[in-house]
Image (tube, rainbow, N blue to C red):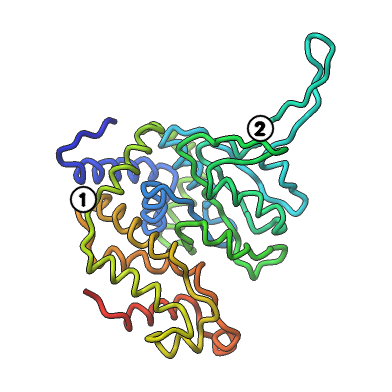
Amino acid sequence: MTLTEPNLASQIQDARDRIVGELSKAIVGQQEVIEQLLISLFAGGHCLITGPPGLAKTLLVRSVAQIFHLDFSRIQFTPDLMPVDIVGTEILEETDHGHRALSFVKGPVFANVILADEINRTPPKTQAAMLEAMQEHQVTAAGTRYELPQPFFVLATQNPIEMEGTYPLPEAQLDRFLFNVRIDYLPAEDELSVVMRTTSTKPEPIQPLFSGEDVLRFQSIVRDVPIATAIAEYAVRLVQATRPGRTGTPEFVNEWVGWGAGTRASQTLVLGAKARALLLGRAHVQTEDIVALAHPTLRHRVLPTYKAEAEGVTIEQIIDKLLETVSKP
């Protein structure tokens, strides 16, 4: 599919409908999760998908890669996984003339879509191996830099941190994810549909709809979407209100938040809002786009205090209160 300049918003909305229709062959329900994942891809950011095992997190990521006809690589994170297992390593090879030379063997990170499956099942040392790739779209091995293919997405899944055998992701790495998307259990009727579908006929294969060039084109279009200064200011005020100890910070934030979101959160809100507007067929950003993306943008960037945890106050409740407190344009 090639996008033309007229009616870009309607064309991208049509593309979204086709993607959702194709995903419905494999995924039942989870519409909000799918929307946030697509916004992340269209905005050119990485996405962290959090939820208990057995909720089709891996299937969802694999299906998205198939729709976009992108080179897909799956890395299963385990406690014994090493950084070289992700990035690659140099090996000693013998040449035709009998000489020996070091040759770099690329790791699974050299792909368009990386499924970092259960990323919090491996220690922080190995988790950190993804940092340079996620931020710079390159890796360094033995002093040599290697560019990663474009487009490049890391779609990571993690189990709730309360589960056995998990390691918390470092804050620096969490901030590299555009969104932290929460996936929850399906309603009874959707779960019944999954059971009936997966225990009878073989599911219909997913057909590729777009190329890597289309994805890069989508990302370029998203950045051209206009946003009113007042709406961008609202996004900034919302993020600044998460930072304790500053003038004008709400009192509940001073009590319940130990560390607030940085500037990357403001950038995420604006860029994600632009992508959401296009996916919904609009050529401009509205305040509702910022509000809709506040939770996936902030939930992994705001750290609660011990007092909040002791009082049973969750990050979701803090963000809800922020949305009620910070005035809208």
Query: Would you say residue 262 is visible in this rendering?
Result: yes
Residue highlighted by disc 1: 281
* Viewer-side label of 1, 2: 2
Label 2 is placed on what type of residue?
Lys
The structure residue drawn at horizontal position 34% and vertical position 74%, both measured from the top left corner, is 237
Give the position of the C terminus as an image quadrant: bottom left
Answer whether labels 1 and 2 touch (C-beta < 8 Å). Answer: no
Residue highlighted by disc 2: 106
The structure residue drawn at horizontal position 75% and vertical position 54%, both measured from the top left corner, is 79
Rendered location of residue 140, percent (x, y): 65, 41
Rendered location of residue 101, percent (x, y): 79, 22
User: Picture quarter containing residue 268?
Assistant: bottom left
104 up-or-down from 42: above or below: above
- Secondary structure at badge 2 equals strand
The structure residue drawn at horizontal position 48% and vertical position 61%, both measured from the top left corner, is 180
- Secondary structure at badge 1 equals loop
Q: Residue furthest left?
A: 6
On the picture, is 230 further left or further right than 60? left
Query: Would you say residue 209 is visible in this rendering?
Result: no
User: Picture quarter containing residue 168?
Assistant: bottom right
The front one of 164 and 265 is 265
Rendered location of residue 83, percent (x, y): 71, 46
User: Picture quarter containing residue 303?
Assistant: bottom right
Rendered location of residue 179, percent (x, y): 45, 59
